[in-house]
Image (tube, rainbow, N blue to C red):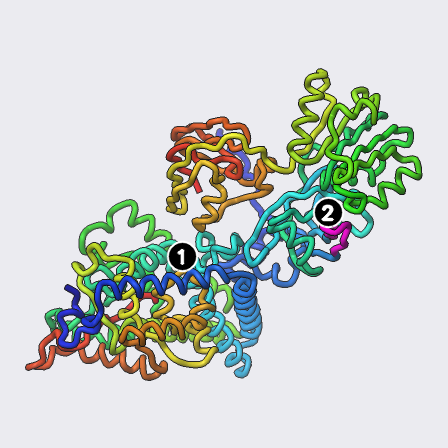
Amino acid sequence: MTVIQKKADNPIAHLSAEDIEIIGKELDAIRDRVIADRGERDARYIRKVIKTQRTLEISSRAVLLFSLFPPAWVVGTAGLTVAKILDNMEIGHNVLHGQWDWMRDPKIHSTSWEWDHVSPADQWKRSHNELHHRFTNVVGKDNDLGYGIMRVDEDQPWKPAYLGQPLYNLINACFFEYGIAAYDLELGESLRDGRHKSPEFRARLRAVGRKIRRQVLKDYVVHPLLSGPSFLSTLAATFTANLLRNLWSHSVIMCGHFPNGVETFEKTSIEGETKGEWYLRQMLGSANISGSRLLHIMTGNLSYQIEHHLFPDLPSNRYQEIAPQVRALFDRYGLKYTTGPLPKQVASAWWKVLRLSLPNRRGKQAQSLAPAPLVSAGA
Amino acid sequence: MTTTVPRRPQKASFRTRLLRLAETVTTPLLPEDYLDLVAPLRSGAALRGRIVAVRPETRDAATVVIQPGRGWRGHRPGQYVRLGVDVDGVRQWRAYSLTSVPASRDGRIAITVKAIPDGKVSNHLVRRVRPGTIVQLDQAQGDFTLPAAAPERVLFLTAGSGITPVMAMLRAGLPDRADVVLVHSAPTRADVIFGAELRAMAEAGALRLVERHTEADGLLGVSELDTLVPDHLDREAWACGPVGMLDAVEGYWTVNGLVDRLHTERFRPTVISPGEGGTVTFTGSGVTVEADGATPILDAGENAGVLMPSGCRMGICFGCVVPLRQGAVRDLRNGDLTTAVPGDGVRIQTCVSAAAGTCDIEL
């Protein structure tokens, strides 16, 4: 039995086992059509995004060499922020998913890509692709649900420490890339169960240390030094760009699995799960963000979180093309396609963080409330 | 009294230090990732080329003229080049004979490609590719070349696109007094690649040209050489063409005990015996696939999304060689079985090897 099946209004009560398998087959067909059509147009798209990102990054950094001049600071910081967001979201996240491996270009491949982020690509790939995408929203399996330090579900007993979770979440948002690095490292768990002494953990820790050193040296030492008299203002600019990038990606990722309407699942519910049931869990465990084409690109098309979770390895530019077909499928089978504009979804997610920091309201049964995954370290 | 060994000067060159500084700014990317945006053909870059022209030769063949990057080291006539071109967004590598003369004044090189039915890359190059396209290149390779002291009596035996490496030799020119015979087969007169140029060469007395139009006259049998070129066995011979023709030619020269005077270039692998198939694990990528005994491990890996090094896909260039940690593979060309246990350090060509049982590939 899933967590959702305990709820008063079980959203899948009306589906038979056959229905679920038919949904799975229809989704397979959507995927097959994209793969058969995947080609030069898609390759051109990702190369264009990469070229844009690199041009923007290098020119923003060049402008910041003169950051003492206020307009240069503003333009350079804005450009660098957008470049870092593109690097992490539309490019890094998606390349590391293997969405572009089919091109067989060794320069744009999940095995060789590295991103502008303190978590080394290989560690992120493991925690994100192997764990989060497989065990999406399964309480106790998908560590994206709350990092193990926050209350993510009404069923979890309340402790006074949870009063601080809005603050933890804010700090996490500001330094999100470090939060992800610690999460990919399973730092908390390793410290608790003594795994932190193993050579394997130490090797991974050293890799993170190296990555942090390189990132910090670039953003906070070399680039400011190259700016000469603009040292301090460039330092402030790169710090601001990293901060804004962190706040942005944290917001987008909170919207993926957290807003009202997203379901969570019990560990036992995925034992012997069929392909159709796996698809169904992805459909109900994710939420989209509606908005303009620019918004979709800036979120790395994680605004199509539902489509991304159904088909994590399809090229990201295809999600918005298949979204109407996916949505039609939801409608046909009476399922809720959770979506909304960014401010609404962010507010909805934050409201849950605040609400769950307090004990459950008396008289309300835990299971009658929407379950509440807290923070996800990726999408 | 003690002496100390004088310290070796460890000063890195200015260029190296500058590069290191640049790397601290561009990390996690490399400076080259930015330079590639503006100067993909610069010296020091991964070798690439820009297609500058595509000239039709026959109804299904075209010459592709390429401006190679600064790192191009030149070629000898008869050699081939591995070319990586994106077809439908997917990078495909193939090997093609160079048909241009070495060290041309404009520095350009040319390959001549014949579109084969269902040939993904050849059709793309002949019919669709546009000037301006950037392609990936490797340095020229191959020993299907003339020796430094070219022999005075030469026989070239070619068919179809097999004329391409020989054309490079003819264009580069043989010694003045050389006695050259070219026996070339093509379906019709119009299908002879470089037909006009070859006939002009023959007219000028540079060679004796024997054209065989197989649609009208049938395939050339080796026994016909007795009448066409009576002294063929006295000549140093170079042969390039389809598998059947090369097998016949090799057999004939071997029987006559003169196989060391025959040089051949094969463009496709001969599939003789498929292996039995098995489970292939790519240990580095963590991918496991079931492959049958007729599927090259290269194809099996690529279809599973593994980034496989590859080249000619016909067993000649060794661009696809990877370590076989353990297991058994069968060579698709001759049925030879290769087995390995950890520590053997066995490396295999994935393009002509199929699984013959469970195998672990280090990739």
Indicate the quadrant containing the C terminus of chain A: top left, top right, bottom left or bottom right: bottom left
Q: What's under tag 2, amino acid-wise?
A: Thr
Q: Output the chain of dot 2.
A: B
In the rendering, at what x and y percent does residue A289 appear? 36, 77
In the rendering, at what x and y percent does residue B8 appear? 56, 39
**Cα gap from disc 1 to disc 2, whole angstroms:** 42 Å
Q: How packed is label 2: few (under 14 Cα within 10 Å), some, or many (20 or more)? A: many
Q: What's under tag 1, amino acid-wise?
A: Ala
Q: Nearer the viewer, mark 1 or mark 2?
A: 2
Image-based side of A209 in relation to B175, left or right: left
Seen at 45% across and 30% down, the residue is B345
Disc number at residue A121? 1
Disc number at residue B112? 2
In the rendering, at what x and y percent does residue B304 appear? 43, 49
Q: Name the element at disc 2.
A: strand
The magenta segment: B54-65
Seen at 53% across and 36% down, the residue is B352
Indicate the quadrant containing the N terminus of chain A: top left, top right, bottom left or bottom right: bottom left
Relative to B58, say whether A288 is above or below: below
